Amino acid sequence: MRSSLNLFFGSLLLTTTTPLLAQQGCQKDERCTMVVYSEQSDTWKIINKARAQRAFSPFSTYKIPNTLILLEQGKVDTKSTYQVDTAQYKPEKWWPKAWLSDDIRLKDAFQNSALPLYQSWTNTLTKPQIQAHLDKFSYGNKDISGPLDAFWLNSSLQLSAVEQIDFLRRLDHKSLGLSEKTYQTFKSIFLKESTPDYKLYAKTGTGPIARKTYVGWYVGKVENAQGTHYFAFNMYAPTFREMVKIRVKKAQATLEQLDIL
């Protein structure tokens, strides 16, 4: 897959100068990027190439590899319910109410980005365990030298939008060295929306990287009549509140006008 990425960068045809994208979607020279790889047609579409290659902290998109690791290591399952250890991670005013439920299921923890739960679960792993998996996954820079429960939060672990897609393709091709049970269980967790026209698998991620600068992610895949389309979007916003309002809408608007959704 790495070789195909190198070839693609050598002969990429940018789509950002066409009227395909409406104003609400990611635009050329805007502080955002969208990368789409369509598996069946072996074609790439990219907006803002330089940003697509720039590495950022994954924030909650790291819950994709993290959930895979936790499932493979038997630390979590889909039958149990969980609750945040509020003695270890004291509730903050900004926490969503869903995080304080006493019967959180794994899919809800994933979709609602229940950070303190994932931090507690990650603390049950060792860094050598995590490193071994991320090496097999070839996940970004694979650097987990930051804190055990926060190396993906504006810390050592970094990856680009293109690398997000490379990882998602490895996941779909089942080349991550995981059990079939882990792959199948995660697919149900990853599914965000199913309609007669498509299935959407997606994960958000957001966090601060500098003063008045938040990076927001939306990554995943769409399965439709044309096949499988992997996507990775990121953008900047000055506040968390603004980011949460617009990141998914902006990403999905871009996917719609690329005829993916």
Image (cartoon, rainbow, N blue to C red):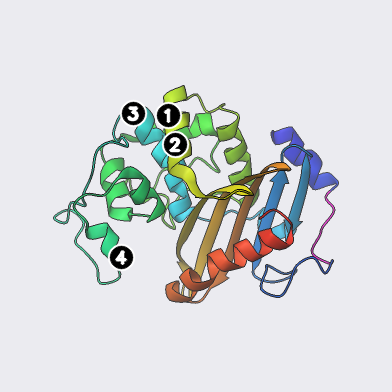
**Mark 1: amino acid:** Thr
Q: Which residue is mark 1?
A: 182
Between marks 3 and 4 in the image, the one whose residue lies nearer the viewer: 4
**In the image, 125: left or right of 174?**
left
Label 1: which secondary element: helix
Badge 4 density bin: few <14, some 14–19, many ≥20, Cα 10 Å: few
Q: Residue at left 53%, top 73%? A: 237
Between marks 1 and 3 in the image, the one whose residue lies nearer the viewer: 1
**Mark 2: amino acid:** Phe
Measuring from the top left, give residue 99's x and y in whole percent.
Answer: 27, 58
Contact between marks 1 and 3 (CB within 8 A): the answer is no
**Mark 4: amino acid:** Pro
Badge 1 density bin: few <14, some 14–19, many ≥20, Cα 10 Å: some
Contact between marks 1 and 2 (CB within 8 A): the answer is yes
Q: What's drawn in magenta, residue-wise? A: 12-17
Measuring from the top left, give residue 71's x and y in whole percent.
Answer: 36, 32
4 or 2: tag closer to the N-terminus:
4
Badge 3 density bin: few <14, some 14–19, many ≥20, Cα 10 Å: some
Q: Which mark is residue 96?
A: 4
**In the image, 195: left or right of 78?**
right
Q: Which residue is mark 3?
A: 73
Q: Which mark is residue 186?
A: 2
Measuring from the top left, give residue 169's x and y in whole percent.
Answer: 62, 37
Badge 2 density bin: few <14, some 14–19, many ≥20, Cα 10 Å: many
Cα separation, mark 2 vs mark 3, equals: 13 Å
Between marks 2 and 3 in the image, the one whose residue lies nearer the viewer: 2
